[in-house]
Image (cartoon, rainbow, N blue to C red):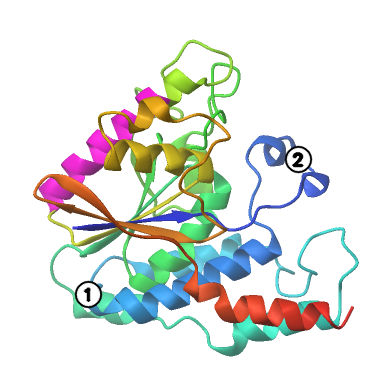
Amino acid sequence: MRVVFVRHGKQIGTGSRETERDKWDPPLSTQGHQQAELLARHLAATEAGGAAGGGGGQVRARYEAMLPSDVRKECLEKGVSQVGTKAKMVERLVEKEKPPEVADAAAAGGGGAAPVCCVTSPMRRALQTAAPSAAALGCRIVCHGALFEYGCAGLAQPGTSPDQLRADCPELEFAGFSEGLSFWDYQGTEQKENEPEARLRAARFSEWLRADLLSSKRPLTLVFAHQTYMDLLLRLLLEPETGAEEWRYGANRFKFRHTACAELRLEAGKWSLLSENDARHLERFDEVMKEAAKAF
C-alpha cells in the first residue's frame, strides 16, 4: 500500500490577506492554483488507470466554483505589478491541456470502492490543492482534523467546523475532528499548540492512517498537508522509536517545495521511503517561469 504525502500549493502573501480568516487560514494564490492543476494533470496521467467510482465530476464542479473569478487573469501574486506577458505565459501552460475528466469516465464504470483516496488538512490551502486531484482521479476527499499545520490551532483558535468547510465543498467526508465533529483535532491545553502536543497529534493521525489502510486495503492514498507537520509525520512513520522525539520546529529533515510529493510504502507492517520532494509535474512550469522572467 502506497501513501503519497503532498505539500499544498503556494498560498497568498501576507499583504493580500484581507479578511480575518485569511490571516490564520490563507487560501492558495493564483500560482498555487496553477501548481495544483499541474499536479492533478500529472496524477491523472500516472495514477488514473486504477481510479474508479466516486463523484469526481461533482468535485470538479465544486472546485471550479471555489476558484476566484479572475484567477486566470491576475498576475502570479496579488499586488505585484507583473501583469501581461508573465501572467499570459503561465496561463497558456496551465490551459494548454485541461486535466482529463477521468473522474466522470471512472464513475461511469461503476462498481466497488475506489482504490484511491485523498485525505486532506482542513486548512484552505491544502483543501484547494487536493480538490483538482480528487476530481482528476474520481476519488473521495476525506478532511482529517489532525492534519493542520503545526501551531495553527489551540484554545485561542480552534479552527473551522465541518459545516464551514462544507460551504466550500459539500462532498467532503470528515475524520479526526474533535468530539462532536466541532473543530480541528487540537486536544491540548495551550492557547497555541506546542511541540509535545504536535507529537501526540501526529501519533493519533498515524494510528488512524494505518488502521484505515489495513481495513480498506486501498493501494494508493494521497495525503495533502503542510511542510512542518509532514516532516514530523514522516519522521514518526519511518523512525518510530526516535523520529518524533528528535523532531524540532524549524529543523526540517524532509523538505517539500509547493505541491511536491514524498511516497511511502506500508508493507508487512513497516514503512519505507520510495521518493521525496518529487516535483516532476512542475518542470515545464519552472521553464516557463524562467522564460517569463526574461521578459521583465
Residue lying at 49% horizontally and 61% vertically, measured from the top left: 260
Q: Nearer the viewer, residue 295 or 118?
A: 295
Q: Nearer the viewer, mark 2 or mark 1?
A: 1
Using the rendered view, name the quadrant where residue 247 is placed: top left
Residue 27 appears in the picture as rendered: yes
User: In the rendering, at what x and y percent does residue 202 appear?
Assistant: 36, 32
- SS state under label 1: helix
Element at badge 2?
loop
Checking the image for residue 1, the label placed there is none
- Residues 63 and 170: in front is 63
Highlighted range, magenta: 199-216
Q: Residue at x 75, y 40 (%)?
A: 19
Query: 10 Å neighbourhood of mark 2: few (<14), some, or many (≥20)?
Result: few
Instruction: Note whether residue 177 is visible.
Output: no
Q: Which residue is disc 1 drawn over? A: 50
Which quadrant would the C terminus be assigned to in this image? bottom right
Q: Main secondary structure of the magenta part?
A: helix
At label 2, which amino acid type do we have?
Thr
User: Which residue is labeled 2 in the image?
Assistant: 19
